[in-house]
Amino acid sequence: MQWHTINEFFAMGGYGLYVWGSFGVCALTMIVEPILIRHRRKNALRNICIND
Amino acid sequence: MINWFKYSSPSSFYPLAGRLIPVFWMLAAILGAIGLYIGFFIAPTDAQQGEGYRIIFIHVPASWMSMFIYCVMAFWSLMGLTFNTRLSGMMTSALAPTGALFAFLSLWTGALWGKPMWGAWWVWDARLTSELILFFLYLGYMALHAAIDDPRRADRAGALLSLVGVVNVPIIYFSVKWWNTLHQGASVSLTRSPSMASTMLWGMLIMALAFWAYTIAVALMRARTIMLEREATSEWVKHLPDVKEIA
């Protein structure tokens, strides 16, 4: 392993902004997408109940 | 012999998808954890790019997925136009937003990689430009589909768009060969051994599998929701246990 301290890990050899900017946005969108679908599903289920 | 056409009807596809979703979420989480561990803790520092190259572990899998999802959409579109099955259009529209997300992530991570390595967030290079077109094709599909009220007509129009647009996928793939690009050539190819350390390659491949599992899980979730929306008045939907729970 090439990291000796946690700070070194977050610094990413000076590329921290770019590396974490990439992984951060990737993680965020992949968390938000299923939440949005859940929301859409709940709405769909509610509409079925209203129409019944 | 599995009767595939049985699952092309939403009423039998819906419960099957429901059972598969947690399996693919588990796979995505496990593979993602392994891939990230390899990517950050096992893969060595790159000789030329230092730690900045670690963006590869999401950039390449996201780019692959963006192209692959479009091909799957084109496949479903062809099936839809040929057999006129309801499921095809639902699957195509279930995949489009996730494909758009991966195309966006490919461009976003590419920009964050390009800035420190090339000195530019963006260049009008053949690879970058064709990937941007792919992103617009996804958005175009979604806009076209949303603009037509009748879902079956929207499916047919969208199917045509995705079939025409699929020519862009080989253009993206071969762009680094056909044109002089700033973007580097393929790191992984079928005809020669990969030009990277094996731990880097493994990290990338496992992340790609994690993205696959994620895509399947999310696309199935969205497909199920689309079924509920479109078939809200049909008997099978009214008798679903999910609906009874809410009522």
Image (cartoon, rainbow, N blue to C red):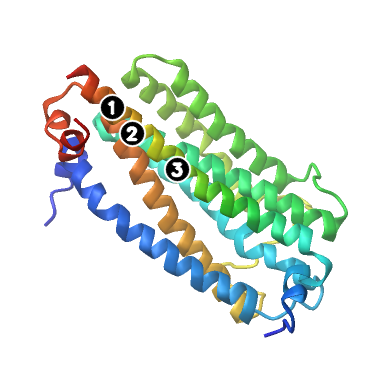
Residue furthest top as drawn: B149
Q: Nearer the viewer, residue B153 or B142?
A: B142
Q: Chain of mark 1?
A: A
- B170, above or below B187, in the image: above
* Camera-side residue of B172 and B114: B114
Q: Amino acid at mark 2?
A: Lys
Residue marked by disc 3 = A35
Of residues B212 and B68, the one nearer the viewer is: B212
Q: Is residue B146 above or below residue B26?
A: above
Kindly identify which residue carries mark 2. Answer: A42
Q: Are marks 1 and 2 in contact (CB under 8 Å)?
A: yes
Q: Secondary structure at mark 2?
A: helix
State the separation of the CA atoms marked 3 and 2.
Answer: 11 Å
Residue underneath mark 1: A46
Position in image of residue B201 (x %, y %): 59, 74
Secondary structure category for the residue under label 3: helix
Q: Residue at x 79, y 73 (%)?
A: B50
